[in-house]
Image: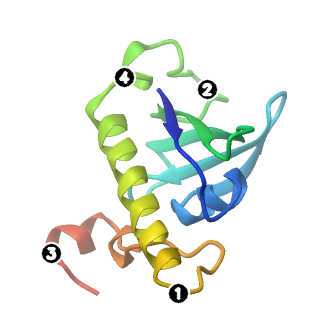
Amino acid sequence: MRCIIAGPLPADARGMMRHLGYAECHTPGIGITFSRSTHEARFPRFHAHAEDMDDGSIVIRVHLDQESSSGTSSHGYVWAYHNPHLIAEEARYRDIVEKLRQKEASGIRIVAGETATADDKRGLIGKLFRLM
């Protein structure tokens, strides 16, 4: 799935991915990519590549990894690129970016890597039962 987030943005692509809760990883043959687990386990996870555009926007190409690519890869399946989880993830991007823009407009300093919601840091059980 390809997602364009219109600029200007409070950070470059690398910084924005940290704001969106992604960790940086190095993928052989591709370079720097980003991943975010959907819950406590390593997989499934969102795997993304982000790049800065000349107009201040960023382009995020994201797919869902069901398992490690060292074994059987899920990249050949349509659902890895087009599924409800990716649509929800794009909506999450837009929500976080809007909150960051509001903070920036109100003069609040934005810290690199700060996520907009604490809910993203909780695991699946914490989200289901609202535990801390």
* Numbered marks: total: 4
Left or right of 116: which side holds 27? right
Identity, as a three-letter code, of the amino acid under mark 4: His
Which label lies toward us, 3 or 2? Answer: 3
**Marks 1 and 3, how far apart at CA:** 31 Å
**Marks 1 and 4, how far apart at CA:** 36 Å
Upstream in sequence: badge 1 or badge 3: 1
Q: Position of residue 2 (x, y in %)?
A: 51, 28
Which label lies toward us, 1 or 2? Answer: 1
> According to the image, label 2 marks what residue?
71
Residue plotted at (56% across, 21% down): 72
Upstream in sequence: badge 4 or badge 3: 4
Q: Say the numbered circle drawn on residue 108.
A: 1
Q: Nearer the viewer, residue 9 or 62?
A: 9
> According to the image, label 3 marks what residue?
129
Identity, as a three-letter code, of the amino acid under mark 1: Ile
Q: Residues within 10 Å of mark 4 (few under 14, many from 20)?
A: some
Instruction: Using the rendered image of the protein, determine whether residue 47 is visible from the camera's viewpoint.
Output: yes
Q: Nearer the viewer, residue 25 or 67?
A: 25
Upstream in sequence: badge 1 or badge 2: 2
Identity, as a three-letter code, of the amino acid under mark 2: Gly
Residue plotted at (43% across, 42% down): 44
- Please, what secondary structure does the residue beneath circle 2 have? loop
**Marks 4 and 2, how far apart at CA:** 22 Å
**Marks 4 and 3, how far apart at CA:** 29 Å
**Quick check: 111 above or below 70?**
below
Q: Nearer the viewer, residue 1 or 26?
A: 1
Labelled pair 3, 2 in contact (Cβ < 8 Å): no
**Quick check: 127 above or below 110?**
above
Upstream in sequence: badge 3 or badge 2: 2
> According to the image, label 4 marks what residue?
82
**Marks 3 and 2, how far apart at CA:** 34 Å
